[in-house]
Image (tube, rainbow, N blue to C red):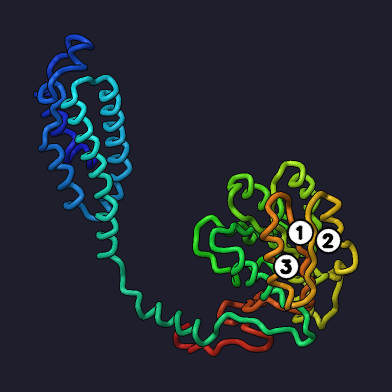
Amino acid sequence: MLFRSVSQSRYEKKRKQNSIKKTSKSTKRNESPTKNHDYDDKFFAEMEQLYQDLNAIELTKIIKQLTEQINEKIKKEEELMQQATDKSYIQHIVNNILRYRNILIKLNPAVKAEFAKQQPDITAWQNEVYGWRAKFPLGYDKPDDGSVSPQFVIERIGKISGLDTIFAAGVGQHQMWASQFIGYEKPRTWLNSGGLGTMGYAVPAAMGAKVGAPDTTVWAIDGDGCFQMTNQELVTCALNNIPIKVAIINNESLGMVRQWQTLFYNQRYSNTSLESKRVPDFKMLAEAMGCVGLRCERPEDVDKTIEAAMAINDRPVVVDFSVYRDAMVWPMVAAGKSNDEITLVKSMAPVWDSQEL
């Protein structure tokens, strides 16, 4: 292997030349570091030169092996230190450990620097994308009837709960809105089933996240359809002290399917109306399962309802947000269309330069 051919073989040869046969454990514990524990400055010099001489591809090939070998050396040094009694000998071991670790620390910026040299200039592409963002910004309309906008609810949950919050979502419009209108800044804070379409995913996923990170706020963003798939697990949450928070984006419909029926099937709504603003009563259902049940039906109550849910940390909380029924997810690509036929809002698509497609 590359690492061994460059440095290890020379190091091992030198070490064998300098090694002294061990006569007893007591001798091993108390010998001078200049004898049995001579690690040869030349080895460290070769190692430090190694990360400077190799390019990025070569470095990535050896970094795993190098890390394993140095970690093994550190482990052996620590074992020797537990047996040692001589202070100067202990200090020598400590110095070697620090020098080994310093080699590992230096590898990371070396790899980054080499890859930076090999990266293509993507400034023009970035400017193009930023131009699209400026021309077609993310947004939503307020409902004309004064009802609650589902995008607004999700946006406010994200703002009020903070960047450390973990969010899980079911499947459908609320899943899309949760990915768009919550400003994720940290890894492992957004859980959803992606394109698998797993309705009912939000509540059990939030349960698992809360068990794994008990000191972190966990919200399940769920639709009224998805919630009825796995809401019985709230009993498990109540009995086992798993205080998740659930936001039901209740548009009394299977919203994603309803959107397609509105746009492509002349508003023939087949099996998508759930009437879940009437039955079941999610607030009472939550309370029956040992949780706190809240309801929000007006835009001006959204923030204080979220804050009330955030203040409860000893029990699960379920908030029934009654939202505008016909809110839609944008942008979207209709079935059978290519991505250049993306629709921003109803009957409106970007004007592309055909020569760039």
Of the pair 289 and 266, the residue shown nearer to us: 289
Q: Which residue is mark 2?
A: 283
Residue drawn at x 70%, y 70% as measured from the top left: 304
Q: Amino acid at mark 2?
A: Lys
Whole-percent x and y of residue 91? 19, 30
In front of the other: label 2 or label 3?
3
Whole-percent x and y of residue 113? 25, 60
Whichever of callouts 1 and 3 sits on the residue coming sooner in the sequence is: 3
* Mark 2 to mark 3 CA distance (whole Å): 13 Å
- SS category of the residue bearing label 2: helix
The answer to whether residue 179 shows anywhere in this view is no
Q: Which mark is residue 227?
A: none
Q: Amino acid at mark 1?
A: Val
Q: Which mark is residue 305?
A: 3
- The quadrant where residue 201 appears: bottom right
- SS category of the residue bearing label 1: strand
* Mark 1 to mark 3 CA distance (whole Å): 11 Å
Task: Kindly check if marks 2 and 1 are in contact, taking CB atoms under 8 A apart as contact.
Answer: yes
Whole-percent x and y of residue 136? 55, 85
Task: Report crowding for label 2: few under 14, some 14 to 19, many 20 or more residues within 10 A (C-alpha).
Answer: some
